Image (cartoon, grey):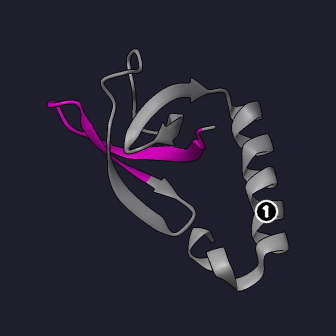
Amino acid sequence: MCLAVPHVIIDLAQDGSAMAKAGAIVREIRTDLVDDPAVGDTVLVHAGFAIEKVSQEDSEELTAMWDKIRELAGEEIDEFK
């Protein structure tokens, strides 16, 4: 089973890399596997690669699910706030 975390692209480079934000975490990701990535897109990230773009509706649903996971896990994953 793999786990993909929703991130919002906040900066895009010409070499296929991007900076993306998930909660309070900003990290570099690769966008080679998605078509036409753009700043503001929400993408699912696994192992540092954006693997799928998601709609605004799906993004909101995924964010709510991650909020619930954080609530259930407590302090163990507070860094995703």
Instruction: Name which residue lies at 49% across and 41% down.
Output: 45
What is the magenta range?
2-20
Instruction: Name which residue lies at 35% across and 57% down.
Output: 27
Q: Main secondary structure of the magenta part?
A: strand
Instruction: Name which residue lies at 30% across and 24% down.
Output: 32
Nearer to us in this view, 68 or 57: 68
- The three-letter amino acid code for the residue at tag 1 is Ile
Q: Quadrant of the C terminus?
A: bottom right
Q: Position of residue 59 (x, y in %)?
A: 69, 39
- Dividing the picture into quadrants, the one containing residue 61 is top right
Nearer to us in this view, 8 or 79: 79
- Does the magenta run of residues contain 3? yes
Q: Is residue 78 left or right of residue 44?
A: right
Q: Which residue is mark 1?
A: 69
Q: Secondary structure at mark 1?
A: helix
Looking at the image, the residue that sits furthest to the left is: 15
Question: Is residue 68 positioned above or below 79 on the image?
Answer: above
Q: Position of residue 16 (x, y in %)?
A: 22, 30
Q: Residues within 10 Å of mark 1 (few under 14, many from 20)?
A: few
Looking at the image, the residue that sits furthest to the front is: 1
Q: Is residue 28 left or right of residue 66?
A: left
Question: Is residue 56 positioned above or below 4 on the image?
Answer: above
Looking at the image, the residue that sits furthest to the top is: 35
Question: Is residue 32 positioned above or below 40 on the image?
Answer: above
Q: Position of residue 37 (x, y in %)?
A: 39, 25
Instruction: Name which residue lies at 48% across and 41% down.
Output: 46
Looking at the image, the residue that sits furthest to the bottom is: 75
- Dividing the picture into quadrants, the one containing residue 34 is top left
- Does the magenta run of residues contain 43? no
Q: Position of residue 22 (x, y in %)?
A: 53, 57
Nearer to us in this view, 27 or 2: 2
Q: Quadrant of the N terminus?
A: top right
